[in-house]
Image: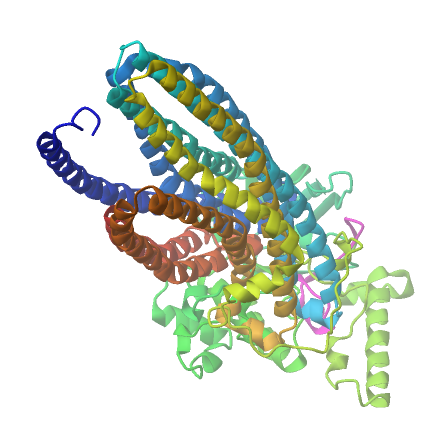
Amino acid sequence: FGSNADDPDVMVREVVKYAFYFLVVGAAIWASSWAEISCWMWTGERQSTKMRIKYLEAALNQDVRYFDTDVRTSDIIYAINADAVIVQDAISEKLGNLIHYMATFVSGFVVGFTAAWQLALVTLAVVPLIAIIGGTHAATLTKLSSKSQDAMSKASNIAEQALAQIRTVQSFVGESRVMQAYSSALSVAQRIGYRSGFAKGIGLGATYFTVFCCYALLLWYGGYLVRHHHTNGGLAIATMFAVMIGGLALGQSAPSMTAFAKARVAAAKMYQTIDHKPSIDRNSEGGIELDSVTGHVELKNVDFAYPSRPEVPVLRDLSLSVAAGKTLALVGSSGSGKSTVVSLIERFYDPSSGQILLDGHDLKNLKLRWLRQQIGLVSQEPALFATSIKENLLLGREDATQVEIEEAARVANAHSFIIKLPDGYDSQVGERGLQLSGGQKQRIAIARAMLKNPAILLLDEATSALDSESEKLVQEALDRFMIGRTTLVIAHRLSTIRKADVVAVLQQGSVSEIGTHDDLMAKGENGLYAKLIRMQEQAHEAALINARKSSARPSSARNSVSSPIITRNSSYGRSPYSRRLSDFSTSDFSLSFDPNHRMEKLAFRDQASSFWRLAKMNSPEWAYALVGSIGSMVCGSFSALFAYVLSAVLSIYYAQDPEYMSREIGKYCYLLIGVSSAALVFNTLQHLFWDVVGENLTKRVREKMLTSVLRNEIAWFDREENASARIAARLTLDAHNVRSAIGDRISVIVQNSALMLVACTAGFVLEWRLALVLIAVFPVVVAATVLQKMFMTGFSGDLEGAHAKATQIAGEAVANVRTVAAFNSEAKITQLFATNLQRPLRRCFWKGQIAGSGFGVA
């Protein structure tokens, strides 16, 4: 346009030639954009799927000590649900963006050095300063991101514990205390979010300050070169455009670097578990397999303390022996070490000293997977997973046939009720088996153990939590199951204890008395066992009297009341969720809570909150939003202002008067320096205040969401779609999405709207005809972009649902890691988890194809 201004024919011919070049470049961009988006999306989903599977596999392969001391169940769920998403986002989008922007940066400088190397060289001198600012910015955000994730993990832990134990929470009207603890944990993450917003604003503001000052230097030096005939205006502007685009690309890579910083933190946490080697390795090929097992179990001088409390001894010089095919009953007060014996025989732990022998062989010398295959475990709280009855039974033996499954169910008194269910053995049991009664769950657990055909049977208060009718059916099944097997029984029912060949009374981790029931009762008042039995009988009689006096007391109460000394809640197999609510830390924050109010239904999918409802919820932060919007609008106008400065300087470069050129260019350089100072201030205002808005809304949404969930009736939690792991995932992801929509997206919308307004106004003022042409093609670009976003959103719900199902499986497996280990079911659970991740993986492939095409058109 400059050199051919006096020859219109040549100008038109050149314009047509370069217009054709733009068409070719546009076609190439479409193809490369399709390849970039589709391939990176597919790669990110595949990598995150592999990482999720590897992580769960590694977590389930850890020994129980690891879960006692190093990790909580909520940490595992948070990693699978949130950390893996952060890594996936970094690979699917940010890695492609970084390569894209860095290629733009490099190619921009290549073009710059080719056109006017002096200008490019000056710009290159400023790049280290930009890199230092960007590096400091990324390091700061990485540190804050790590702290924020830790804080959110603690909040997620509180919510998930409460949801998993919702019956306990509602029974003790503990909703308010849960909300206080949850709000206190969220407040920590909220404050870290404020600091992150300030750091982000300062970092981006400093980057733009440096970039605009660099442009001012370039314009001034470009004018110097033109005045002294070292280059012409066209090459100078071409160099500046190339360097400008390359510099902006370097700045635009900053969010990608931030995402990588967050992804490194998230991945590091996951790889800590993946790379951790358990001290008791169930996959070890070391150890021997006995040709035959008679079932003689012996504990010799065993000392033991749990890793989480090494200073508190649980077993002290304990010696016990169970002859092959015989039954040993363990009784004693809570904390005497009964369930610890079960854990040591299953080799969840190794004793601090002493030996545990099977047929004369130390358990440490036996192959662990083989050992656990010889042991059947039935605990007080049977762990069933949110899949079908058949799949739960197959955890006992993967290769069991349908005939063998049904035979085991018949022996366990379970077949008759299973076939009455709508789908028979394919019926879903719900989260933690909540679709079934306690007795039904216990009989399925017995059938599962029967499928192993174990030589040794461990019964940890298998009937203590059942009513009399269910107990009778379960006890009949257990009596048949115990025939010919070495059995260790932890029991409080007198009828069960009497049937044992030997009864051992534990007290403070040692054997206080041992013998048959009759021998121990013969000791009379001098015997501890006799005292325990007498106390149980007195409690039973008192319960009968109270039942007759009070009609409000259920008639089945006498079946559930027993001695506080003999009866206990099994510490073995207890979910990590079952921490007392009184252990939660609380703050001065309080929420009014009506325990009598129960919402009938909270359909997450059907009751999506509208934008205006969210905006109303965010109304207390209107002042922050106003200041943040002012910052966004000013920052948005900078690009339009810079375009005007560049076009003005372009015309000045073709001026014939050197003094006029020098004077005018100096004026615009000072203008850019002023803009750079404003960019530092208003970027800080934009990101700080919008982050305050977003963080406050996120905290408020999470609190209201959990409050509403806790108000639902118990039946609501029994539905598959309302499993605790799914709700916890929604608390994490949905609130994060809301925060992105209100905090981040509105900030960008206000910024871009201001840019559009200023740019269109300037365009119509400067050259209205060209502005009309640009506005005419603008809807095509917008339509293509909207189509791409709509397609992405259309898949998000399905993908979240599929991921939620997988997360639920993982949560239940980790919460019941002892049961998973006892049945050697790690591979089965991992396979089930991987199967539920295949659906989002397949859909992501097609989503990437169309999203890539839409992005290319845009």
Q: Percent from the top left, x then y, of residue 36?
A: 27, 41
Which segment did they paint magenta? 489-511
Q: Residue at x 48, y 74 (%)?
A: 411
Q: Position of residue 381 (x, y in %)?
A: 61, 65
What scheme was used to colour the molecule? rainbow
In the rendered view, would you say 252 is above or below 545? Answer: above
Q: Quadrant of the N terminus?
A: top left
| Residue 298 visible in the shown view | no
Q: Is residue 692 magenta?
A: no
Residue 674 percent location from the top left of the image: 53, 28
Q: Could you say which quadrant of the image residue 642 lies in?
A: top left
User: Is 491 covered by the magenta stretch?
Assistant: yes
Indicate whether 464 appears above or below 670: below
Query: Which residue is located at x 52 percent, y 24 percent?
Result: 133
Q: Residue 386, position in %: x, y?
A: 48, 65
Residue at 53% across / 53% down in the picture? 736
495 versus 782 height, above or below? below
Q: Nearest the camera: 802 or 318?
A: 802
Q: Is residue 793 visible?
A: yes
Front residue of 47/390: it is 47
Residue drawn at (44%, 20%), measured in percent from left and top? 666
Q: Residue furthest right?
A: 525
Q: How many marks?
A: 0
Q: Is residue 856 left or right of residue 51?
A: left
| 489 displayed left or right of 615 | right
Q: Nearer the viewer, residue 805 or 771?
A: 771
Observer-nearest of 819 and 700: 700
